[in-house]
Image: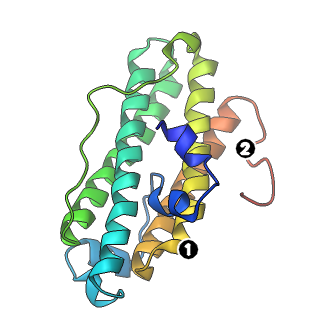
Amino acid sequence: MSFLSFVHNPDTRDARRVFLGRSGLLLSGAAVALMAGRDALAKGKGKESGASDVRILNTALGAELEAIAAYQLGADSGLLQKPVLDLALTFQGHHKEHAGLLAKTIQTLGGKPVSAKEKYIFPVDALKSQADILRFASLLEKGAVSAYLGAVPVFDNRDLAKAAASILGDEAMHWAVLRNALGEPPVPSAFMS
C-alpha cells in the first residue's frame, strides 16, 4: 500500500492508529528522556499497549524512510534550483533525524525497526519541473500532517503522543513552506483535518 493511499484510508481506527507520519524537530523533555532509553512501558498499560505503540512508530518510520527517498529523488532530478534544492535537502535532513529517533524509540520499546525499501514507487513520469516536485513533496507533507493528526490521540503512551504532536508541527511547517514556494496560500484553512 502506498503512503498516500494509506494516509487517506479513513475506514478503520486501526488504519489511523497504525500510521504515524513523519518529521519533528522539537520534542518535549519527557519525550526526549523516553526516547533516550527510559522504560516507556512503565507509563503505559503494559506489554500489549507497548506493542501497539511500536506498530504505530514502525509505520511512522516507514513513512520517514519513504520521505527521505522522495526528497533524494527531487534532489537528484536536476530540476530543483539552488534555493529550492537547499530547502529539499534541509527537509530531508529533518526526516533523517526523525527516522533515527523513531528507530531508537522502537528499540527502546523492545521492537525491531523497519528498514527502507529497496525501491519506492513514485510518480517519476509526472515530475517534469521544479513545481511538479514541490507539489509532490507538498502532498506527501500534507499526508503526514493528516496521519499524525489521526495518530496522536491513539497512542497508549502519552509521552509518545506528545512527541508525535511535535513532529506533526514540523510536518505542517514543511507543508506551509512548500505551498508558499508554489505560490499557494501557506495555510489554506484555520483547521486541519
* Residue 160 place in picture, x, y as percent: 40, 73
Of circles 2 and 1, which is in front?
Answer: 1
Pick the residue in front: 125 or 130. Answer: 125
Amino acid on which the number 1 mark rests in the picture = Pro
Colour scheme: rainbow
* Residue 83 place in picture, x, y as percent: 51, 26
Q: Secondary structure at mark 2?
A: loop
* Residue 82 place in picture, x, y as percent: 48, 21
Q: Secondary structure at mark 1?
A: helix
State the image quarter where residue 42 is shown: bottom left
On the picture, is 142 further left or further right than 30? right
On the picture, is 144 further left or further right than 119? right
Q: Provide the residue designation for mark 1.
A: 153
Up/down of 192 relative to 51, above or below: above
Q: Is residue 101 visible?
A: yes
Up/down of 55 relative to 179, above or below: below
Pick the residue in front: 6 or 172. Answer: 6
Q: Provide the residue designation for mark 2.
A: 186
Q: Which mark is residue 128?
A: none
Identity of the residue drawn at 41% across and 45% down: 63
